[in-house]
Image (cartoon, rainbow, N blue to C red):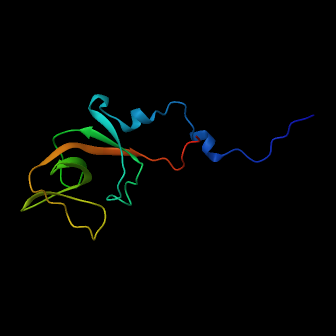
Amino acid sequence: MQRQVVGFSSPAQDMISDGISLDKYLVQHPLNTMFIEMNGDSMRGMVNANDLVIVERSNEAAPGQVVLAQIDGQYLIRFLGRDREGFFLYGSRRNEQPYRPTSDIAIVGVVTGLARRFRKPAS
């Protein structure tokens, strides 16, 4: 019996590479990098629940960057903002009020990327 192939080759076939490594692509400083699984929706539209957020540990961050911060005893991933009253954190929703600390904000790291799964792995 002769085997037949149906369909056509994918135009993306030429772009497939055996040399792509997500950790090399997403992580610049492996010893200072951690992966955190998101479970909230404060960054909806950017970061979804169950996404893996890549955080590079650093004490320095600029306003406008997404950071992992410890604020008032809890860890939050939000945008870092600054105004004349000081630093604050804010999410991606326009109607959400900024989170202003009652004490200091400790920047744990800057979010440098994320990994998202579109379907659950088979059990």
Query: Number of marks in the image?
Result: 0
Identify the image quadrant of the C terminus: top right
- Residue 29: image quadrant is top left
Residue 82 image point, x, y percent: 13, 58
Residue found at the far left of this picture:
84
Residue nearest the viewer, comparing 45 with 74:
74
Residue 18 image point, x, y percent: 55, 31
Residue drawn at x 37%, y 54% as measured from the top left: 47
Residue drawn at x 17%, y 45% as measured from the top left: 107
Residue 50 image point, x, y percent: 42, 49
- Residue 81: image quadrant is bottom left
Residue drawn at x 32%, y 34% as measured from the top left: 28
Identify the image quadrant of the N terminus: top right
Residue found at the far bottom of this picture:
95
- Against 97, is 62 above or below? above
Residue found at the far right of this picture:
1
- Against 61, is 83 above or below? below
Residue 52 image point, x, y percent: 39, 44
